[in-house]
Amino acid sequence: MQSLTSLQHQPPATAKHLLELQQLFINTGMSARFSKQVLDRLAPTKSLNAGLGNLIELIRTQVKSYDLMEDQAQAHLIAGHPGSGKSTMIARIAAQLAAVDGSRKIAMISFNDDRIGAWQATQIAGARAGAETYRIMSYKQLQTLHAEIGETHHLLIDTAGADIRHEITSITNIIPGIRSHLMLAADANETMALDLLSNPELNWTSCMVSRLDGIDYPWAIVSVLINSKIPVSLGSYCTKLTSPPRILSGDFFAHLIEDKIQRHLKISEQPKDNFEATEQATLTMLNRSAHKSLNFG
């Protein structure tokens, strides 16, 4: 509501191609806040193609990336709301780390998660990934475990997500230098995600994205990444633990959105006569099929 109220005081777009882009953004689910931000950046453009080109370049250059596999840090935690895909992503990361770094063992740590079946799922995922699994229910236990295996293992901590801010700050105090990653579903709430990523106390290393196949236009994620300045790292399309995580970047999102917009424009630009002809042809085919069926009967 605050975003919509602020838009009332802004002059509306008047150029034809900007109005077309504005309608396109509305039709594809872009938020009012991000739409206003994008249209302001596209205001100097003179045509629809130029506006789209600037939009794609904006995404490509403003969404930064982080390569987890190239980071020398030995401990990573993934935080996020329950059901966002943290456990599945950790299992995939474990399998990838085991493949690229044989000098250390992999430890998957379920931290303070008392949901029914959560620990059993972690054990199964760890067995598939070739990782050791640990169930830790307190910060003191985590401190003890870190002292025992911190020098010999990659630590991958799956947090419960009940109190993200407290979990991150407390675990960071126990394991200095740990990398913190926020897991978001592709259809995550934009405002809530920005609230978490924009908090300077949490010192996020990257943002991860799950269920990329569950949304058509990832406007909310792109808005969050551009406005938070936090790099994106890994993503996933499905729940199969055997499929590796997808490396994400500004190029990835730019290409994804450009391809979807081009298909959208081709459909919308198809002449009305073509739709009527297609519809008439379809009706004719159905009538013929019905006639044949009656004759056969």
Image: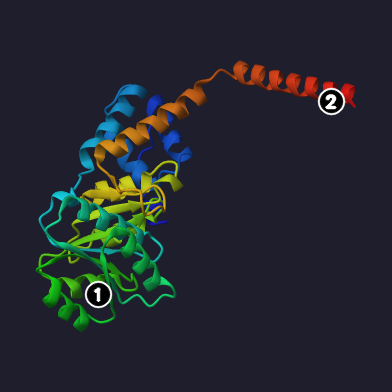
Query: Mark 1 belongs to which amino acid?
Result: His
Mark positioned earlier in the residue sequence (2 or 1): 1
Q: Position of residue 255 (x, y in %)?
A: 32, 33
Residue 103 placement (x, y as % from top left): 11, 58
Question: Who is closer to the viewer here, 16 or 129?
Answer: 129
Question: Residue 214, position in %: x, y?
Answer: 45, 48
Using the rendered image of the protein, determine whether residue 8 is visible from the camera's viewpoint.
Answer: no
Label 1 sits on a secondary structure element that is helix
Judged from the image, the secondary structure of the residue bearing numbered disc 2 is helix
Q: Toward the viewer: 67 or 7? A: 67
Mark sitting on residue 166: 1
Q: From this view, report whether residue 96 is shown above or below residue 132.
A: above
Tell me, for residue 247, which label it has, or none.
Answer: none
Q: Which mark is residue 293?
A: 2
Residue 254 vs 175, above or below: the answer is above
Quadrant where the C terminus is found in the figure: top right
CB atoms at circles 2 and 1 under 8 Å apart?
no
In the image, 30 versus 83, the foreground residue is 83
Identify the residue at image location x=20%, y=78%. Answer: 142
What is the C-alpha distance between the residues marked 2 and 1? 69 Å
Determine which quarter of the picture holds residue 204: bottom left
Colouring rule applied to residues: rainbow
**Nearest to viewer (mark 2 / mark 1):** 2
Q: Is residue 28 visible?
A: yes
Residue at 21% from the left image edge and 55% from the top image edge: 98
* The image quarter in which residue 147 lies: bottom left
Q: Amino acid at mark 2?
A: Ser
Q: Residues within 10 Å of mark 2 (few under 14, many from 20)?
A: few
Which x, y percent locates residue 46?
A: 31, 22
